[in-house]
Image: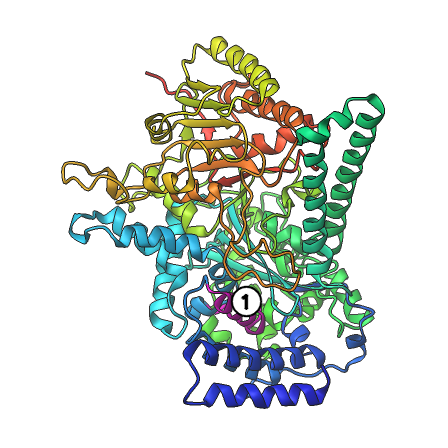
Amino acid sequence: STSSDLENAHTLYSEVSISPFTSGISRGWALYRLGLIELRKSRQNGELFLLWDGHSISGNKDCAETEKADVPIQTDGTGHLSKARHFFTRAAAFSGPSSHLLSRKILRSLALVNGPDNDMENVGSSAATLVHSSIGSSVRQLVSRAYSKLDSSALDHEQNLMQTLFESFDEKMDDTMIRNTAIENLFEICGKIIPQDWRFVAITLCPTGEILLAVISMNASEFSDFPVGLKTICIFAETKSAFSEIVEPLKNLIERSQKHLSKMATASTGENYNDETSKRKWWNERVQIDQELQNLIKRTEQNYFGAACIHDILFGTEGCHEVASRSPFSSPERLETDVSSSNVCGDLFSKFEAASKIVDDKSPIKIREVEDTHVIRQITAMTVVQLRSELAGMGVGVSKTRKLKKASLIDLVISQKRMEVSEARQSMELPNAAQGTRRSSFESVSSTNPQKLHVSDEPCLFLILDEHFQQFPFEGMSVLNSKTVSRIPSLPFAVASLIEETTAEMSDLSCTRPYVDPAICSLVLDPESNLSKTQERMSIAIEALTKANSWNWNCCIGRHPSRSFMEEGLSRENGLFLYCGHGGGERSFSRSQVETLFPNSHSKSKEHVEPLERRCRSSVILMGCSSAKLSSVNSSDTSRNVPIFYEPEGIALSYICAGAPCVVGNLWDVTDRDIDRYCISLLESFLSPDQGETDYRPSLPKCVADARDVCKMRFIVGCAPVCYGVPVRCITPVN
């Protein structure tokens, strides 16, 4: 748009926003559009890039914006960012629930203009919290409403807590105190019950094309009283938009794959593939699609998620370096400094410790003062955001550093480091001093901080994906190969699953995590009786598996199960429900029937307490085409310009909402032989004890990742299966 067009639009939206005849939602849209105009201006003059300096990556080095001069961020309300923040905040008051299209756009835009600083005193407006709030609101509200319909007098502490959990992220933006309190309470519970080596990564596409990656981790710092760590990185798009480089190519590729499979599946055209030449041609096309998906995943990882700082926050090293902060306004000299001090943000203490030469010679500690020029140079090279983050890690409150300028922050960091050296000198306890106080987020913390003792024996990365990215197979990226990765609609679902398994009071941090008893399994195989090869292959494999372990599974093969069979199989504590057939089994047990397992959704008899709880207690494996696919009710429109008004939904999320701890399914349609091979490998690795190490069994998400290697089509089939929910393990209880 030209400058005159923007001015005309600004005038129009301003008139709409103040008109007494404007409806609330229209006023919200007008204010949002005004915010977008200011946001785009802040990008053009460089304010936005400077705001995210030190917490961003960009491939826009050749963009025209690189020729702009540095413009300081205006904090007096006159800058474009301040104006955008003002308009977005006002718009939020008229936008409705977080699941609304306008609300999602506002929350993501606010996260972008608020920047990477996380003000823990106003945690409800931090970038990370806003991003997480903008994803999964529909399903959060679905579960929350189920609890809200219950008789409050009949609810116990746990059930009241569950309702509060699912409402936390959806508290109104214009009631700051209530929103901050609700989210602080959620994070406090997280710090008590979630293992500290679990990380929750939300990925969203902003309306203006940037990608925000927001991480919530369990805070392993002994210096911070805040129970979780928040970190956000902004990925500025390449020359083309992320939508056109990631979302559209994937959609086109999946559509091609669907059409290609339908040629073979259609009875009338299937005869054309009886001769060897036609079959070979069909498979060559299939291999081509597999190769194109591999290239798309690889290209996306390299261009958007390959930076070292992305890997750091995914796995907990917390540094933003190498290609970080390559904004259009970073000079070559600045980039050289950034690279040379690559670990300043995340590993300053260890560098200082090395520079201080802590020597183990069984004599008084020999430590130099903080006058080492290398250390001083690293501290002075840090950005304001990095300096504040470093001070927060030393226990200096945000309120004390908010108004300090960079020079004062540098002096304060050096002063704090000198105090640490002095204390180390006085301690005379060399082993403790030499060991340092920095901890990896995948390590347990000391007993001086009992809130942070709760760890698992298998770190897990949870992906919380918005409506644009939910179908992208991030699990196929090389950086996530063989890692334990699970998807989840929102953080409260992980907390709820752990609470439902907790046998002790919340004040007691010991809790059990969901598991699967391999003897308690229900199987539905080929209920429509038209997948004879699948029925044959799976029957042989499952019979061998159950006989070898003396398991007696409830099986329904070649026919539709009764409703009682399904409800009993799904409600068995620590059970496993396995489905092999078409789709996600909706023809056998529909989404509306799954939702009868929600609280208060069946018998209201006072003699039963089950309706007060989510009744799906079994983990679920759905080995059918597109069984884990999520789609919006208006996504059938093929027009590329139609926005996704409603958040995606699907049978897999219905099971998660009903209480299933873990659900496995396929993101798109797959070939039967390859997915049967995958399923057999998955069951064998998950259910069979390891002969060499019988005390350890990998979690279901880990087995989902490992089983991909058996697929001939490693990407178009191997990357289709994904896991939702929390990691569950197979454990055989001892009687």
Main SS of the magenta part reads helix
x, y percentage for residue 204? Answer: 58, 59
The image quadrant that residue 120 belongs to is bottom left
Q: Residue furthest right?
A: 277
How many callouts does the rendering have?
A: 1
Left or right placement of residue 575 versus residue 4 in this view: left
Foreground residue among 333 and 363? 333
Residue found at x 36% / y 34%: 617
Q: Is residue 189 above or below residue 38?
A: above
Residue 669 visible, this angle: yes
Magenta stretch: includes residue 108: yes
x, y percentage for residue 660? Answer: 41, 37
Foreground residue among 126 and 283? 283
Residue found at x 58% / y 32%: 704
Residue found at x 58% / y 43%: 362
x, y percentage for residue 608? Answer: 18, 36
Foreground residue among 87 and 149? 149
The image quadrant that residue 601 belongs to is top left
Q: Is residue 24 above or below residue 354?
A: below
Foreground residue among 536 and 191? 536
For the N terminus, give its image quadrant.
Answer: bottom right
Q: Which residues are magenta?
A: 100-119
Q: Is residue 278 above or below residue 240?
A: above
Write down the residue under mark 1.
108
Q: Residue furthest front?
A: 268
x, y percentage for residue 525? Answer: 50, 22
For the C terminus, give its image quadrant.
Answer: top left
Magenta stretch: includes residue 489: no
Q: Is residue 94 above or below residue 681?
A: below
Residue found at x 42% / y 52%: 139
Residue 78 visible, this angle: no
